[in-house]
Amino acid sequence: MQNMSTDSPNATDCKDLAYTKVTKVVLPVLYFFVFIGGLLLNALATWIFCHISSQSSFVVYLKNIVTTDVMMLITLPFKILSDSHLGPWQLKAFVCRYNLVLFYGNMYLSIMFLGLISFDRYLKIAWPTKNFMVQKVIFAKVISAGCWVFIMGSAVISIILTNMPSADKITTQCFDFRNEQSKNWYQFTAIKCQVIFWITFVLLMLCYSAIFKKIYWSDQKLHKDSSNMIKKVNRNIFSTMGVFTICFVPYHIMRLVYKRPNNQKGCTTYDTLYYAKEFSKLLCAINVCLDPIIYFLLCKLFTKLLFKKMRVKQGHEIEMSL
């Protein structure tokens, strides 16, 4: 899996932005708050899902997202310490070779499972009386396992190729651990990950647009007052799309426009793009704090069990979301 956070030799003429107060203090502090918030929310989510059986493909995908979020959270303390320069140079080597690879791997797994959830919800709404093969629990488990093998297999290759000894143990950047073969591999995975993201983004747009259209016209045909239903659908659709867009779209746009300078004239632009890229990557990490919102809004079993465990009485039964 790609390591997109490193500098290249083309940027060495510009100031080393990895050693500024923003990257050494501000970003690590923000990542620390993300870690604490994500740890609390995902500990609760994990506890709840441990009491929910995998009785539908929808629940299977949600459990996989919880797993990816927990694994991403595990990588954050190492990133925080490394970016803050609080550990030895060996910590930087560990982060470059293993930690960032797992960070990105779990990020793209989360993206893929959100895409699968949107397709699963579309089939449930568009054909509520049918049970397609892709909606069966066994199929969901198989395709989930396939996603893990595909992404983590790529991650293992990245780890193996990131094996160059560092010549400078003080100012080591992740780029220094790459040989020519690994550089070509990272270029390939960068393109692959962009393709995964934008295909998933289009899939979400198409599926949720179709869901909204289906519910709206069904209520119109039955001459029902659809205002409440439409509001509920809008809430669920826009919450899911909102989380996905806020967390992932800025980073992938930055990856399309981010270029390293070949000379001093490009340093001003490089500085701006570098900081924009780093903060957009922070948004990707914030996804671990926002995913529980999706569980709460979309999964009836999760919401009911949450209220039950918290001993909160509901004034009315929560209807199944999308």
Image (cartoon, grey):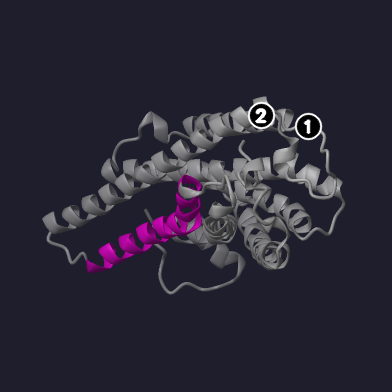
Picture residue at 58% right of the left edge, 58% below the top: 271
Res 56 visible: no
> What residue does disc 1 label?
164
Counting from the top left corner in percent of width and height, residue 190 is at 54, 37
The one nearer the camera, 271 or 162, is: 271
| 20 left or right of 250 in image | right
Classify the position of the N terminus by image quarter.
top right
Secondary structure that dominates the magenta span: helix
Which range of residues does the magenta coloring cover?
227-256
The one nearer the camera, 254 or 236, is: 254
Res 269 visible: yes
Name the kind of residue labelled 2 in the image.
Answer: Ser
Name the kind of residue labelled 1 in the image.
Answer: Met
Counting from the top left corner in percent of width and height, residue 161 is at 71, 28
Q: Residues within 10 Å of mark 2 (few under 14, many from 20)?
A: many
> What residue does disc 2 label?
182
Counting from the top left corner in percent of width and height, residue 201 is at 39, 46
Q: First in sequence: mark 2 or mark 1?
A: 1
Picture residue at 84% right of the left edge, 50% below the top: 170
Residue 122 is labelled as none
236 drawn magenta:
yes
Picture residue at 14% right of the left edge, 58% below the top: 220
